[in-house]
Amino acid sequence: MIGTLETGYGVWSALYWLLGLVVLFIIVYFIYSLGGKTVKASGDKGKPFLSGNEMEKEKIHVKASNIYWGFTEALKSYYTPLKGGHTGNINDYVSWFVVVLAIVLILAGGL
């Protein structure tokens, strides 16, 4: 049986949460059902376009290196030294995490 949870902030009942989720689902489904049903299935459904002009997928595909070019170019002096520290080996990253965590705990402990 689902009971209540008493906290310092009040009483939380799982049944109220479930009831709220059901009501929210009904509201969302009602709004969804009001949507337009005029879309017709056709062969052109997944065809890429740019401002109404049909284009080939390769011509309109933007690579991630192009998206962040200005950002990485502006901070090149910061990113270039950091590339040497990234080996791609998860053991190195976990080791750095453990070392930094140990230093933070020592400093927080007041030693």
Image (cartoon, helix red, strand yellow):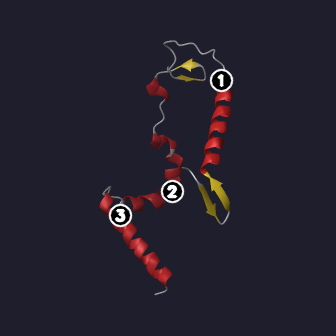
User: How many marks on residues?
Assistant: 3
Residue 64 in picture, x, y percent from top left: 46, 41
C-alpha gap between disc 1 and disc 2: 48 Å
Q: Secondary structure at mark 1?
A: helix
The extreme bottom residue here reads 111
* Nearer-N-terminus badge (1/3): 1
Q: Secondary structure at mark 2?
A: loop
Question: Which label sits on residue 86?
Answer: none
* Nearer-N-terminus badge (1/2): 1
Q: Is residue 105 above or below residue 44?
A: below
Question: Circle 2: is it few (<14), some (14-19), or many (20+) Cα within 10 Å?
Answer: few
Residue 79 in picture, x, y percent from top left: 45, 58
The residue singled out by tag 1 in the image is 33
Question: Which label sits on residue 94?
Answer: 3
* Nearer-N-terminus badge (3/2): 2
Q: Is residue 15 left or right of residue 68?
A: right
Q: Amino acid at mark 2?
A: Leu
Q: Amino acid at mark 1?
A: Ser
**Which residue is located at x 50 percent, y 80 percent?**
108
C-alpha gap between disc 1 and disc 3: 49 Å
Depth check, mark 1 against mark 2: the one in front is 1
Question: Which label sits on residue 75?
Answer: 2
**Which residue is located at x 36 percent, y 62 percent?**
93
Residue 61 in picture, x, y percent from top left: 47, 31
Q: Is residue 75 left or right of residue 31?
A: left
Question: Circle 1: is it few (<14), some (14-19), or many (20+) Cα within 10 Å?
Answer: few
Q: Is residue 91 above or below residue 111?
A: above
Q: Secondary structure at mark 3?
A: helix
